[in-house]
Amino acid sequence: MRKTIIISLFALASLLAQAQEKFIFTPQWTAQAQFAGYYVALEKGFYKDAGLDVDIVHPSVTQTAISRIRNNESQATTLQLAQAMEIIDDGIPLVNILQTSMNNAMVIVSRTGKNPLKQIGEKVGIWNAGFGQIAICMSLNDHLDYRWIPFANSVNLFISGAIDATLAMSYNEYYQLLQTGIELSDESVYRFRNHGYNIQEDGVYMTREYYDGHKEQARKFADASRKGWEWAVENPEETLEIVMEYVQKEHISTNRVLQKLMLDEILELLVDRESKRREYSLRPDMVEQASVLMYENGMIDRQITYDELVAE
């Protein structure tokens, strides 16, 4: 009897230690509605209910999300599919444990009266933190030969006239430009998802090494995160309040109108265009398309397969 009690106490202690194990999640960018579902999962206790002690730690100027993953300072991050492929090709095996984006949100914005497909050789803004792999492939495939001008996280280069066009996310910089009073026509906005480049973007990734030793933890995080996104769909107003709390806590320069527009667009991007459902998983056809595009345009040295990316 005494032996049984001791064994039970050890088992209980082990369970408590696991429940209290810290799980640090780092989105790939600063606080905004792009990551609403994760904020909801934390604030509504979905991670806690799953037995996870989650901290959300945003990247900084000196420490990117992927550097935190490389240094084992965070257990998971969000990445666009094309970004993840570059990192894998660079020698860091990654596993996708949850896919939120089912559609591509990238656009090229030109001034009214200009068509991005006719601006051959002109200066186009691109994020210096990455995110533009598919745009580079499109420029090469369509023989546009854009001159890429790196920017941080501002639309100022475009507003000032220093560049001829700029890459933007339909949920972020696109709305920032509209808020400045710039008029944009259908002709001046090229939406990648409408021109054969509808390749998935944001998903949750961790290193293959970490995943192999923590599969149950990964599953719990993915399930709780998915629950957070589903709650956000059903409760967009309260979700916006949660987002604004994170924005203010992180001292992010933004506004409520922009974050509401971002949230609305992000929630729409969750829905697969073909199935009309929120799938939360990578599509093999999009993985193959991204891999072929990037390989043929010299962005990766070998093709990355669907089986390499998905969790078992």
Image (cartoon, rainbow, N blue to C red):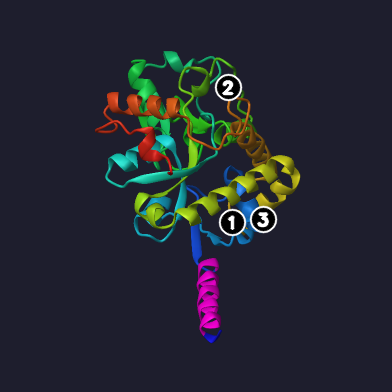
Q: Secondary structure at mark 3?
A: helix
Label whose residue precedes the other's in the sequence (1 or 3): 3
Residue 82's label in the rendered image is none
Q: Which mark is residue 251?
A: 1
Q: Quadrant of the N terminus?
A: bottom right
Q: Position of residue 160 (x, y in %)?
A: 50, 33
Asked whether residue 254 appears in the rendered view, the answer is: no
Q: Are marks 3 and 2 in contact (CB under 8 Å)?
A: no
Amino acid type shown at disc 2: Glu
Q: Quadrant of the C terminus?
A: top left
- Magenta range is 3-19
Q: Secondary structure at mark 2?
A: loop
* Label ID, residue 274: 2
Q: Is residue 182 left or right of residue 63?
A: right
Residue under pointer 3: 245
State whether residue 214 is above or below residue 90: below
Counting residues from the start of the chain, the first of labels 3 and 2 encountered is 3
Which of label 1 and label 2 is nearer to you? 2
**What separation in Å lies between label 3 and label 2 (alpha carbons)?**
35 Å
Q: Position of residue 121 (x, y in %)?
A: 35, 19
Amino acid on which the number 3 mark rests in the picture:
Glu
Mark 1 or mark 2, earlier in chain: 1
Mark 1 and mark 3 in contact? Answer it, CB < 8 Å. no
Alpha carbon of mark 1 to alpha carbon of mark 3: how far? 10 Å
Residue 11 horizontal/vertical position (percent)? 52, 73
- Check if residue 233 falls in the magenta segment: no
Q: Nearer the viewer, residue 184 or 262?
A: 262
Q: Residue at x 65, y 51 (%)?
A: 40
For the residue labelled by badge 1, is the local secondary structure a helix, a strand or a loop?
loop
* Residue 133: % across, % down: 38, 32
